[in-house]
Image (tube, helix red, strand yellow):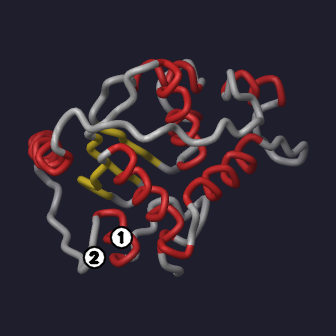
């Protein structure tokens, strides 16, 4: 596994976007039309990353609140400790393999989460076998920002869109994430 500092987050997201929006006639991926509908209004064009936002709340206080709510809903959860400077780095240090079906180098995902820590006040609250739960101090508040962040989420974890709530589109996902202080990911 590499180090999170070895990777440029915007480049990773653009690379993953290209891979997830490409249509290969030999696989069982959705048709070109369906894939373009899912990723509208961006289509196959990577829209770039969303701008940083000023946090509406203290990121660490919000993470503590979300952790309490998370544990109340899932009392079987267990505490994990890792020697790391941040939650993003802890995923790599612990050898987390949640997105292994997409990439075996967790440090790439940690690099993106580190960037979200700085841009949106994101904090890792929980990680499971194939899940990741973040608190977010500066969620999107406009439709434009939400669509950009939804594109980042799709690049980071396409199953969030492909296997999430219907309809399976970026626009529908963006609508549901506006003003929401937690981001949850699941890789199939």
Residue in view at x 16 percent, y 43 percent = 58
Comparing 49 with 3, the one in front is 49
Question: Where is 145 relative to 19, above or below?
Answer: above
| Image x and y of residue 10, in percent | 59, 53
- Residue at 24 percent across and 76 percent down: it is 82
Q: Is residue 176 left or right of residue 79?
A: right
Can residue 74 be seen? no
Badge count: 2
**Which residue is painted at 53% across and 47% down in the image?**
157
Identify the mark nearer the N-term, 2 or 1.
2
Q: Nearer the viewer, residue 91 or 152?
A: 152
Residue 91's spot in the image, x, y percent? 36, 68
Q: Secondary structure at mark 1?
A: helix
Which residue in the protein does label 2 denote?
84
Instruction: Classify 133 as above or below 147.
Output: below
Q: Residues within 10 Å of mark 2 (few under 14, many from 20)?
A: few
Q: Position of residue 19 (x, y in %)?
A: 74, 50
Q: Residue at x 9, y 42 (%)?
A: 72
Q: Quadrant of residue 52?
A: top left
Question: Where residue 86 sits: x, y (%)?
Answer: 28, 67
Q: Are marks 2 and 1 in contact (CB under 8 Å)?
A: yes
- In space, the residues marked 2 and 1 are separated at their CA atoms by 6 Å
Instruction: Name the residue beneath numbered marker 1.
Output: 89
């Amino acid at each position: 596994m590499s180090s999170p500092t070895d990777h440029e987050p915007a480049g990773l997201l653009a690379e993953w976007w290209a891979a997830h929006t490409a249509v290969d006639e030999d696989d069982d991926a959705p048709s070109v039309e369906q894939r373009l509908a899912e990723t509208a209004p961006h289509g196959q064009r990577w829209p770039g990353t969303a701008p940083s936002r000023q946090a509406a709340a203290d990121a660490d206080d919000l993470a503590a609140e979300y952790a309490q709510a998370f544990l109340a809903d899932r009392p079987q959860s267990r505490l994990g400790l890792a020697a790391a400077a941040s939650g993003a780095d802890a995923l790599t240090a612990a050898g987390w393999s949640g997105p292994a079906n997409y990439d075996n180098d967790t440090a790439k995902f940690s690099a993106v989460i580190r960037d979200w820590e700085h841009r949106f006040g994101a904090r890792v609250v929980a990680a499971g076998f194939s899940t990741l739960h973040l608190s977010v101090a500066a969620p999107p508040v406009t439709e434009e920002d939400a669509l950009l962040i939804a594109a980042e989420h799709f690049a980071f974890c396409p199953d969030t869109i492909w296997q999430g709530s219907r309809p399976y589109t970026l626009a529908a996902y963006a609508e549901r994430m506006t003003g929401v202080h937690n981001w949850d990911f699941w890789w199939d």
